[in-house]
Amino acid sequence: MSETKTILLHLTDLHFGDNHSRSHTIFNFSADDISHLVIEKVKHDFTCKNLVIVLGGDITDKGAAHKYQYALDFVRKLRSGFKGYKIEFMICPGNHDIDIKNPNNSFDAFNKFSTDVTGNSKYIYTDSKTSVIHTFNNWSFLSANSMYHKIKDYGILDMSTIEANLKKAKHPVVVLTHHHLVPIYKKDSSVCRNSYDLFKLSLNYGVKLILHGHVHTSFKLDIANAKGKIKIIGSGALLPKIDTNYNNQFSIIGLNDHRVSKVITYRIIFDDANSYRPTAIKS
Ligand SMILES: [Fe+2]
Ligand SMILES: [Fe+2]
């Protein structure tokens, strides 16, 4: 296995501004602790300094503009922790990033956030611009809005723009979207409705990895045909809400010249009696 040339840090379902915990400061935990933890694990696991920070949607809890400030602070802390790294971003919205009070411009607050994060307009999503592709370190990165239809109950992907973007890809491809692609629960109605179309296109166009969030649980599956193999990786929610009991997670993924070289998913635990700080264990 050749060496890792690019690291992906998959952070999804941050839910900043959740009504139960505006600053996510509960018990002995703060969002700063999580940013330190994430930075520490990336540095521990990889020596490579080409980093793609992947923000996979549900950045806030209901898309209200002021809630993105918490997320922006969090990203700034990540940036300063990764000083000396070459940093790129992949960003897509989730169902919680739609501003329900602003139906005509539902992604305005999200788009401002993505512009503030990147310093450019690459990740502005509109009714017609539903996916984005860019190149970094000999890989192509395609981020797709599975909420472009603005119906919060389920995900769907705009396959025509995805195909148009995949045709432009000059390198192996990583795809990011918010909604999960395979039903996980028996009554799983929010799953992406046209995943099979994405799988067929992805196998055709050299996609090596698909990342998603939304279900707040980890997911790993390889799909393959005679043409190639794709890893599908879902990561759980990064930050906790007081009223839930799911495992918080993040994933760190290595890419070599042609394929995924390493996948590490961390589960965050909050009851380390030695440190009284959140810690992360490989799951
Ligand atoms: Fe979520
Ligand atoms: Fe979601």
Image (cartoon, helix red, strand yellow):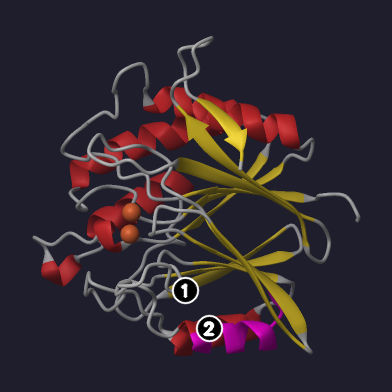
Q: Contact, CB < 8 Å: mark 1 with mark 2?
A: yes
Does the magenta segment cover residue 160?
no
- Report the span colored magenta: 196-208
User: Residue at (58%, 83%) from the top-left corner?
Assistant: 199
Residue furthest right as drawn:
2
- The location of residue 195, given as percent across then percent down, is 47, 82
Does the magenta segment cover residue 202?
yes
What residue is shown with label 2? 198
- The location of residue 249, given as percent across then percent down, is 49, 42
Q: Nearer the viewer, residue 247 or 116?
A: 247
Mark 1: which secondary structure?
Answer: loop
Q: Earlier in the sequence, mark 1 or mark 2?
A: 1
- The location of residue 245, given as percent across then percent down, is 33, 40
Q: Nearer the viewer, residue 94 or 77?
A: 94
User: Residue at (38%, 32%) from the top-left corner?
Assistant: 73
Vertical placement of residue 92 versus 158, above or below:
above
Kindly identify the amino acid type of the residue bearing the numbered disc 2: Leu
What residue is shown with label 1? 181
> Dot 2: within a 10 Å radius of its alpha carbon, few (fewer than 14), some, or many (20 or more) residues?
some
The mark found on residue 239 in the picture is none
User: Residue at (81%, 57%) from the top-left corner?
Assistant: 256
Kindly identify the amino acid type of the residue bearing the numbered disc 1: Leu
